[in-house]
């Protein structure tokens, strides 16, 4: 969708089922490149970023097809290229995940460097340093990382504990599974999406100790075999719908989730005054008043997720009182605030933090999404605002949310997706 038009003011009510995780599925698709045999992935969301990764696998020569039962079958025995097309890496940074598997299994990877991103500086230096530590010869020239290694060799990789990297942990784990000998990764990320990828690798025969912890010991194996795997559900989508329920003073039940993955989020929502009931695979949220102001700081898992910081900012913009949100992961992730100001919010962004002085109500306005999460946050702002909000840049939201319009409508939201108003103006892609 190019734009979303939202008429605010309806309390959301009912149940929403969450799709498979975007950030969890991308590593699974890349992992299939390592496997000698077919990998069938279930619960893969139908979103643009997954489509981009499928195009990437195909560009490398792999077969990737959805079966009738919805499973995505990937066979990488036909891979005949180690060159990742720039157009796909430019569209989505997650494409860089193919670098580790290509190096480990095919001995060479030519992957364009992803470049800038609207949410902040996002280099891939930790990935490249790790590949070098594993014995690859890496050159960065003409905007492309070109790595070569007859066979990667296990080593000790010490990652900076102050800046844990989801992407580098995934890429280096993927690479180390087929290396000769043992690799120890210290200060690894342990986001559920990272852990799901490690579990898939183990199901394919990888020998990984310490799954789910910050120290991984990976004993390289000669080959991995095929398997079937179900991706975890999307905790960011779940969190987005929970916050939507809170903002509209609704009563929503979010299903098909792992509640434990959302612990910090439900904790914050309770502090803000929401009533939360947690089931085995669901969370029910009830809210009947203006939220209380709560301070929050983003941090690597199990800390508060940066991907939900913009939606949380919207909640705090209508809270009773003043709250401070500190963003510790990405230096430009308060981009959405300028748009919120246009809807009547009272927010001041300082270095690495924003102070939200809650107002009783936002007012609808035309606003522009600059990345996936900013777009989702502005949709939420529209749901609780008075009047009509039109969010442009909607294609960015479609990158990460499966049928957000249909799901929100199913719980009573007044939202419609619209095609581009002016065919001359197309939204620039962001590299989130
Ligand atoms: N960093 C470096 N060098 C590196 C790698 C990371 O300095 O080589 C820094 C980054 O600049 C950042 C911090 O380390 O300050 C953490 O970055 P990380 O590598 O963890 O982020 P990522 O892997 O690029 C993934 C998600 C993001 C999510 C972050 C943090 C995917 C495809 N993307 O990005 O998701 O915000 O982890 O949890 O998994 C989104 O879904 O909208 C999104 C941006």
Image (spheres, rainbow, N blue to C red):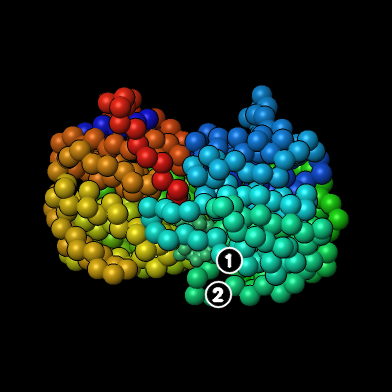
Give the spatial CA distance, label 2 vs label 1: 9 Å
In the depicted view, which residue is nearer to us: 273 or 336? 336
- Residue 294 is situated, as x and y percent measured from the top left of the image, at 28, 65
- Find disc 1 in the rendering and name its residue: 126
Residue at 59% x, 56% y: name it: 141
Please state the total of marks drawn on the protein image.
2
Reply above or below: 325 against 87.
below
- Where disc 1 sits, the SS reads helix
Instruction: Confirm or reject: label 1 Cβ below 8 Å from ligand 1.
Output: yes
- Find disc 2 in the rendering and name its residue: 160
Instruction: State left or right for residue 235 relative to residue 421.
Output: right
Residue at 66% x, 38% y: name it: 57
- Residue 271 is situated, as x and y percent measured from the top left of the image, at 31, 64
Q: Nearer the viewer, mark 2 or mark 1?
A: 1
Instruction: State left or right for residue 357 relative to residue 98.
Output: left
Residue 242 visible to an observer of this rendering? no
Residue 331 visible to an observer of this rendering? yes
In terms of sequence position, does the residue under pointer 2 or pointer 1 come before the other? 1
In the depicted view, which residue is nearer to us: 432 or 202? 432
Instruction: State left or right for residue 321 relative to residue 394.
Output: left
- Residue 188 is situated, as x and y percent measured from the top left of the image, at 60, 68
Residue at 83% x, 68% y: name it: 181
Reply above or below: 187 against 222.
below
- Where disc 2 sits, the SS reads loop
């Amino acid at each position: 969708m190019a734009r979303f038009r939202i008429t605010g003011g309806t309390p959301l009510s009912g149940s929403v089922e969450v799709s498979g995780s975007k950030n969890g599925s991308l590593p699974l698709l890349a992992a299939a490149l390592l496997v000698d045999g077919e990998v069938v992935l279930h619960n893969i969301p139908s979103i643009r970023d997954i489509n981009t990764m499928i195009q990437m696998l195909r560009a490398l020569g792999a077969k990737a097809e959805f079966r009738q039962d919805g499973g995505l079958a990937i066979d990488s025995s036909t891979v005949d290229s180690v060159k990742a097309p720039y157009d796909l890496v430019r569209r989505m940074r997650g494409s860089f995940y193919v670098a580790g598997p290509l190096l480990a299994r095919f001995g060479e990877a030519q992957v364009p460097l992803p470049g800038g991103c609207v949410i902040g500086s996002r280099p891939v230096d930790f990935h490249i340093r790790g590949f070098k530590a594993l014995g690859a010869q890496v050159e960065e020239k003409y905007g492309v990382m070109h790595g070569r290694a007859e066979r990667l060799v296990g080593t000790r990789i010490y990652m900076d504990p102050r800046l844990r990297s989801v992407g580098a942990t995934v890429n280096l784990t993927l690479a180390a599974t087929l290396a000769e000998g043992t690799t120890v990764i210290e200060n690894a990320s342990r986001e559920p999406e990272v852990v799901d990828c490690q579990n898939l690798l183990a199901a394919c025969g990888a020998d990984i100790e310490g799954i789910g912890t910050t120290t991984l010991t990976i004993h390289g194996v000669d080959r991995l075999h095929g398997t079937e795997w179900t991706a975890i559900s999307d905790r960011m989508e779940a969190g987005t719908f929970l916050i939507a329920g809170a903002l509209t003073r609704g009563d929503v039940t979010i299903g098909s989730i792992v509640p434990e993955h959302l612990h910090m989020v439900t904790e914050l929502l309770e502090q803000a005054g929401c009533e939360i009931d947690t089931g085995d695979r669901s969370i029910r949220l009830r809210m009947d008043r203006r939220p209380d102001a709560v301070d929050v700081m983003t941090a690597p898992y199990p800390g508060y997720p940066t991907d939900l910081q913009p939606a949380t900012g919207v909640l705090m913009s209508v809270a009773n009182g003043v709250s401070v949100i500190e963003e510790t992961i990405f230096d430009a992730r308060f981009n959405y605030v300028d748009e919120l100001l246009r809807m009547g919010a009272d927010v001041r962004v300082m270095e690495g933090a924003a102070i939200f002085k809650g107002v009783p109500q936002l007012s609808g306005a035309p606003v522009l999404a600059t990345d996936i999460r900013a777009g989702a946050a502005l949709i939420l702002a529209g749901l609780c605002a008075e009047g009509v909000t039109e969010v442009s840049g909607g294609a960015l939201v479609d990158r990460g949310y499966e049928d957000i319009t249909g799901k929100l409508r199913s719980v009573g939201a007044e939202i419609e997706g619209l095609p581009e108003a002016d065919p001359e103006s197309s939204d620039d892609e962001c590299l989130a």
